[in-house]
Amino acid sequence: MQAKMQVKLLDLVRQYEKMRDEIGAALDEVFSSQQFILNGKVAELEKRIASFCGVRRAVGVASGSDALLISLMALGIGPRDEVVTTPYTFFSTASAITRLGAHPVFVDIDPRTYNIDPAGVRAALTSRTKAVLVVHLFGQMCDMNPILRAASGRGIPVIEDACQAIGSAYRGRSAGSVGRAGCFSFFPTKNLGGCGDGGMIVTDDRDLAERARSLRVHGSRKRYFHEAVGINSRLDEIQAAVLSVKLRYLAEWNGRRRAHAAFYDEALGGLDGIVTPHAESNVHHTYHQYVIRAGRRDELMEFLRRRGVGCEIYYPVPLHLQECFAFLGGERGDLPEAERAAAEALALPVYPELTEQEQEYVVARIREFVTKRRGSAPDADKRMPSG
Ligand SMILES: *Cc1c(COP(=O)(O)O)cnc(C)c1O
């Protein structure tokens, strides 16, 4: 038996150690200037991200959540409007909608990709639908063409929550560049993470970009003149400086994530009770998370954690079943694929700096679980006492 190892789900220290000097220099520039809000660093990062995604405009904001909120505000979404979205995502995809008084209309997911089902989107559109907010979950883009066809026929904009998909592509088009606007998060654990919160909106739509630029500074284009009731949501110079350094490595990091995923696919494919992630052939998947399905997910998670393997459930409760959205009337059984994913999905370590030895350890522990449990029924410990 291999000695016990600790394999974290994510270890950002390894990344930092390789770029300590570069980040130090970037931070020193900002501190030396003592200009922390909307100075040159944010504008420079906006340019770089726009060009990285192949769009004309980018607007730095305080978080991915605010990128979503401001995009919807810029589209004029408000009370009683409907926004079609997925229940299987991080919370703020839907809270951005409800904070504006609009209603999320949850559409079930495709069980193979975990992304919103395009046929479901088409069926959910009504005269009150003001936007479709899709999420490219775990680093894999949605099947955008049928979604765009369904929405644009009715003049409904599609917004991409690309917080988990920076650097991903669909039919050669970058995440964030396919819909009316794309939203990124630079939360530290994302594929491109800052040293705190940060986010960005990317778009080719000049009006939308200008409205977003105004909304992030209290709805003003000219200082102390307010055209709209905006918010305070700026990306700060320190984040932008760090992110500009890290952006240079993003393609390489995403490449490593893909290589790690290929390793797991090979080693775990075909194991009893384990389903490896499905990647569509027309998608460049960047594996923000490497998520397997396991029939006995909770047991497997416990087993792995005890043996030092970091793993996590994304997401244990689909949004239509969250307490705060009870007023929408969602019930168990409404969206069976999202509910099943919530019960079966398990994310394994896939970060770029993960070593081969660590990956082998993760694989060996999963194999051990599968072998030990073979033949024992899922409810073996709950057998009726025989008298
Ligand atoms: C991280 C994330 C967000 C929110 O980003 P923050 O920067 O944490 O506000 C929104 N949607 C998805 C899908 C995310 O993964």
Image (tube, rainbow, N blue to C red):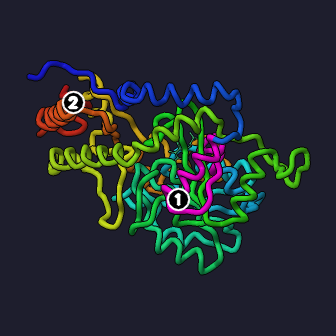
Identify the image quadrant of the C terminus.
Answer: top left
The residue that appears at 34% across and 33% down in the rendered structure is 311
Q: In the image, 280: left or right of 197? A: left
SS of the residue at dot 2? helix
Identify the image quadrant of the N terminus.
Answer: top left
Pointer 1 with pointer 2, Cβ within 8 A = no
State the image coordinates of residue 328 (x, y, percent, origin top left): 65, 53
State the image coordinates of residue 19 (x, y, percent, origin top left): 41, 29
Q: Dividing the picture into quarters, in which one does residue 153 lie?
A: bottom right
Residue 59 is covered by the magenta coloring: yes
Q: Which residues are magenta?
A: 41-68
The residue that appears at 17% across and 30% down in the rendered structure is 357
The residue that appears at 53% across and 34% down in the rendered structure is 242
Gap between marks 1 and 2, in whole Å? 33 Å
Query: Does residue 334 lie above or below 130 as drawn?
Result: above
- Label 1 belongs to which residue? 176
Q: Which mark is residue 358?
A: 2
Q: Is residue 174 visible?
A: yes
